[in-house]
Image (cartoon, rainbow, N blue to C red):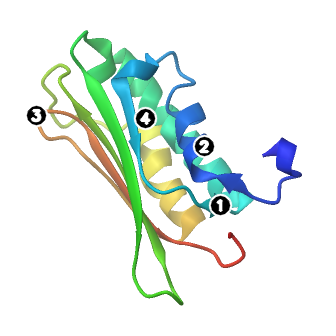
Amino acid sequence: MTAKNWESASLREVVEKSGLGCGADPARVSVEGADLRLMPKTAVSLAMALHELCTNAVKYGALSSAAGTVLVSWHVEGPEDAPSLFLQWQEKGGPRVSRPEKRGFGSRMVERALAAELGGIVTIEFPPEGVVCTIKAPIVSGAS
């Protein structure tokens, strides 16, 4: 973003750098979605959340085992005059997952602070096959 004078950021770059900047093996993280430009505030918030998810995946989740993978996918949905970003982080092939008894700071930050910052909805689910984080937020006009 600094290379672009904080005007906007590529969603693909944010996902690739944040979702791999935690020591993850790039061959085990797949990224799918058409690129779009994000406003700086949105890009920073997403980057922090994705970095937290990646760190947890490397320590405890899918990326902590040799067979585990992560898919980060997104698309735009809704009417043209009020589009929303739908982004999903999905882990597979790691250790069996169970819902934590207590939420840590990172989970709370991702679910509550990110949702508030983006004006959207963020959920983290814990199906046995892997953690799934879903983000749905309005795309702020001006990000082209």
Crowding at label 2, few (<14), some or many (≥20) Cα neighbours within 10 Å?
Answer: many
Three-letter amino acid code of the residue under disc 4: Leu
Name the residue beneath numbered marker 1: 38
Q: Are marks 3 and 4 in contact (CB under 8 Å)?
A: no
- Viewer-closest of 103 and 92: 92
Name the residue beneath numbered marker 2: 14
Instruction: Say if 95 sits above or below 92 in the image.
Output: above
- Of mark 4 and mark 2, the one earlier in the sequence is 2
Q: Are marks 4 and 1 in contact (CB under 8 Å)?
A: no
| Label 1 secondary element | strand
Q: Horizontal placement of 87 versus 66: left or right?
A: right
Name the residue beneath numbered marker 3: 128
Q: In front: mark 2 or mark 3? A: 2
Three-letter amino acid code of the residue under disc 1: Leu
Three-letter amino acid code of the residue under disc 3: Pro
The structure residue drawn at horizontal position 43% and vertical position 16%, both measured from the top left corner, is: 25
Instruction: Say if 112 sits above or below 55 in the image.
Output: below
Q: Are marks 1 and 3 in contact (CB under 8 Å)?
A: no
- Of mark 3 and mark 4, the one earlier in the sequence is 4
Residue 71 appears in the rendering = yes
Name the residue beneath numbered marker 4: 53
Q: Percent position (x, y) of residue 89? A: 35, 44
Q: Horizontal placement of 107 versus 70: left or right?
A: right
| Label 3 secondary element | loop
- Of mark 2 and mark 3, the one earlier in the sequence is 2
Q: Are marks 2 and 1 in contact (CB under 8 Å)?
A: yes
Q: Percent position (x, y) of residue 14? A: 60, 43
- Of mark 1 and mark 3, the one earlier in the sequence is 1
